[in-house]
Amino acid sequence: MTAINWAALNAAAKAASEQAYAPYSQFPVGVAVQAENGEIYAGCNVENASYGGTVCAERNAIAAAVVAGERKFVALLVYTPQSKLTPPCGICRQVIAEFFMPDAPIASSNHLGQQQSWSLQQLLPDAFTPTYLAASAKISKDS
């Protein structure tokens, strides 16, 4: 089991939040993920005037890691300069479930030094994962 470096995750997520492009929500978010090999990757939210084009920090951090060849992760930390600690949104929880084990810790921290942690299972019980697709019966066009 890889030790989780919460201090490094927090520092990387905080630095990423400072690069967030959030002119519409004024809600900058930074995220850092730790891969199974200990490497840390960060991402920030990037908003778009066409709101559907906005990409969350969680998905950007995971995408950066995937580009680097990572596929397995042990922890994720969301940083926001907000008083209330912020867990990942719904679509990000689904993307996290693609790459993290159900018991993986997902944490949130803020500028006040507060931190809260959940397991992925707590945030997204009974997640739809690749195991469902692998176990499914394929339907042919002739059926």
Image: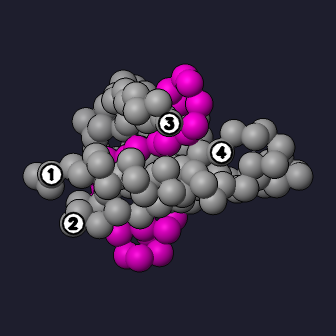
Label 3 belongs to which residue? 111
Which numbered circle lies on residue 28?
4
Res. 36 image quadrant = bottom left
Q: Which residues are magenta?
A: 63-86
Please give the residue where the numbered disc 2 appears in the rendered image: 37
Q: Identity of the amino acid at label 4?
A: Pro
CB within 8 Å, label 4 to label 1: no
Q: CA distance from mark 1 to mark 3?
A: 24 Å
Q: Nearer the viewer, mark 3 or mark 4?
A: 3
Residue 75 image offset from top left, x and y in percent: 31, 47
Image coordinates of residue 73 in percent, x first then y, are 31, 55
Q: Is residue 52 visible?
A: yes
Q: Is residue 96 above or below residue 142?
A: above
2 vs 4, front mark: 4
Give the residue type that dot 2 points to: Asn
Question: Residue 135 in the image: x percent, y percent?
Answer: 35, 47
**Identity of the residue drawn at 59% across and 30% down:** 82
Question: Which badge, 2 or 1, is on the more N-terminal residue?
Answer: 1
Q: Earlier in the sequence, mark 2 or mark 4?
A: 4
Q: Is residue 134 above or below residue 127?
A: below
* Mark 3 or mark 4, earlier in chain: 4
Q: If you read the primary sequence from the N terminus, does the residue marked by circle 1 or circle 3 appear first?
A: 1
- Mark closer to the observer (2, 1): 1
